Amino acid sequence: MTAIHIEEGDWHSLKHECERVRLMVFVAEQKVPKDEELDEWDEASRHFVAKDERRMVLGCARLLPTGQIGRLAVLRPFRKRGVGRALLDAVLRSAKAAGMKEVFMNAQVHAEPFYERAGFVSEGERFMEAGIEHVRMRRSL
């Protein structure tokens, strides 16, 4: 994979691409109920979509006004190619530009090492969310 381009916008401008990725990854693959996946925070959040040089959608993420990063997902064929890190870096830049001093997330436990490599620190006990084990993680900006 050569270039990864990240588009940032509101829910209105990126809803179609974000919904497609999230429904494929979280609902179809991970069996998260659709009504839990698409929630009231989408309208209030900044959204990020990763695309390749042909404008094919590869993944997405969101940043809530509270500083919470969520819904970071990469379509299966594009995993382990730097897409997740490109998305995360874009979210971190946006959060810092918005004046946030720190960000946090409820990370799926299997992704904990990925976020640790990006400077996040786990805190507290593991817990279940949408039937998947998670851990709270935080990072200063």
Image (tube, grey):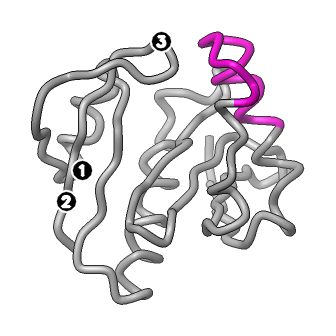
Type of amino acid under label 1: Ala
Q: Magenta residues?
A: 20-35
Disc 3 to disc 1, how far (Cα)? 25 Å
Contact, CB < 8 Å: mark 3 with mark 2?
A: no
- What label sits on residue 13 in the rendered view? none
16 displayed left or right of 91:
right
How many other residues sit within 10 Å of disc 3, few (<14), some (14-19) or many (≥20)? Answer: few
Q: Is residue 4 magenta?
A: no
Residue under numbered circle 2: 139
Contact, CB < 8 Å: mark 2 with mark 1?
A: yes
Residue at the image point whose x is 47% and y is 12% from the top: 131
Q: Nearer the viewer, residue 112 or 130?
A: 130
Residue under numbered circle 1: 118
Earlier in the chain: of badge 3 and badge 1, it is 1
Earlier in the chain: of badge 2 and badge 1, it is 1
The picture places residue 88, in percent across and down from the top left corner, at: 43, 54
What is the quadrant of residue 103 in the picture? Answer: bottom left
Earlier in the chain: of badge 3 and badge 2, it is 3
Q: Main secondary structure of the magenta part?
A: helix
Secondary element under disc 3, as helix, strand or loop, is loop
79 displayed left or right of 98:
right
Residue at the image point whose x is 38% and y is 67% from the top: 67
Quadrant the C terminus occupies: bottom left
Type of amino acid under label 3: Gly
Q: Nearer the viewer, residue 59 or 124?
A: 124
